[in-house]
Image (tube, rainbow, N blue to C red):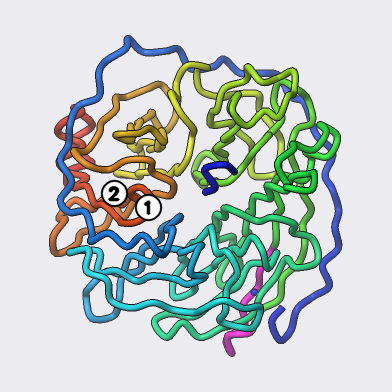
Amino acid sequence: MPKNTLLCIALLSLVACAAPAVHQPVPPTPATAPARAPVVVPERYVSADDTRDELDSLATWPAEDGHTWLVATAKATHTLVVFDADTGKQLRSVGGKGAGAGQFLRPNGIAVFGNRLFVAERDNHRVQVLSLPDFRPMGEFGADGLRAPYGLWIDETGPGEYDAYVTDSFMEGERHDRLPPFEQLDRRVHRYHLVFGEDGRFSARDEGTFGDTSEAAALRIVESIAGDPAQKRLLIADEYTSAKAGGREDAHRPSNLREYTFDGHATGRELPADTFEAEAEGVALWSCSADVGYWVAADQRYPLTRFLLFDRDTLVPRGAFVGETTAHTDGIALHAATMATFPSGALFAVHDDKAVAAFDLGEVARALGLDPACTE
């Protein structure tokens, strides 16, 4: 994420169809819980520094040999970096600079569903799909409509069918540093419906764009996005702060997580205005059981990132923690399944663009007094 700031073979035509902003009654914003200092949860590891890559976003994949991979996008080297999620050891790099299949240009958002890896490339204006474990290119989608794709989240809608939500943080001006006018912010999130055949080919249908255009609910600068299928809720991180305002009159509006429905309606609901001290960055859902879960969001502070937890249903704050080292976090990935090193799962976070850090979810749950289902 800037600090200054598949179609494949059988692709259907992509038709842009902007969905109008729909204003619904505004549900109550969650009340602010009494302020508590974040607890310290030491990292299980922080990988070796590599200042060349400029790591951004993360996704995990359980390999066939029982190990788990942690895959990171590397914007500066236009690659994907693969780590052993249990140890933080770097295993390999994939790709390289270019616009061809299996190449990347400023890869940013990343998601895994089954054995398919989705990568959003800001400067190739597309989402590529690759198969795992071989990273074989399967195709791409979005090039006809995306301008500056950043984050993405995948929702399975049926066997072999998915909805892909892709944030598009295009800007204006010669240096691409000015926010578009409000009337253009109805294109902040694109939705595509993907259908995969048994032969691995897929089609992609453009389902339109969304984003509220009112000053109260508009998405200014967007990147991370995550959803809860049980609640049909999207949480979208708006990184907009006064430092990124570019002279706009709404510069006072703080960075926050904003709630949208799966069909693109802004509910008007967000976290309390003083929730984030810096920028709202990575966001992920921690589903501990069918009834219990928490949202985790990164507050991109320096020298230590704050990781904020909120109730899955009510969005009421449930505590915060910091590590001993992890700072200036962009993307996070939450892997709730049992791993060799992490019996209750792990939270992975980018550390200062140059490394990845891992936290034991069981330790987090105990430190914050969360539901015991999260440690089972």
Q: Which amino acid does label 1 sit on?
A: Ala
**Residue placed furthest toward the bottom:** 199
Q: Residue at the spot x=14%, y=64% of the render?
A: 340
The residue labelled by disc 1 is 333
Quadrant of the rendered image containing residue 56: bottom left
Q: Are marks 1 and 2 in contact (CB under 8 Å)?
A: yes
Magenta part of the chain:
193-201
The image's mark for residue 347 is 2
Q: Where is residue 38 in the image (x, y as percent from the top left)?
A: 25, 24
Q: Residue at the spot x=29%, y=49% of the render?
A: 347
Q: What element carries label 1?
A: strand
- The relative height of residue 198 versus residue 121 in the rendered view (above or below) is below
Q: Position of residue 306 (x, y in %)?
A: 33, 32
Q: What element carries label 2?
A: strand
- The relative height of residue 26 versus residue 147 in the rendered view (above or below) is above
Mark 1 or 2, nearer chain start: 1
Determine whether, in the image, residue 323 is placed left or right of residue 189: left
Q: What residue type is labelled 2?
A: Leu
Compare residues 263 and 254 and report the one nearer the observer.
254
Compare residues 59 and 206 and report the one nearer the observer.
59
The local crowd at label 1, few if under 14, some if 14 to 19, many if 20 or more residues have their Cα within 10 Å, is many
Compare residues 46 and 130 and report the one nearer the observer.
46
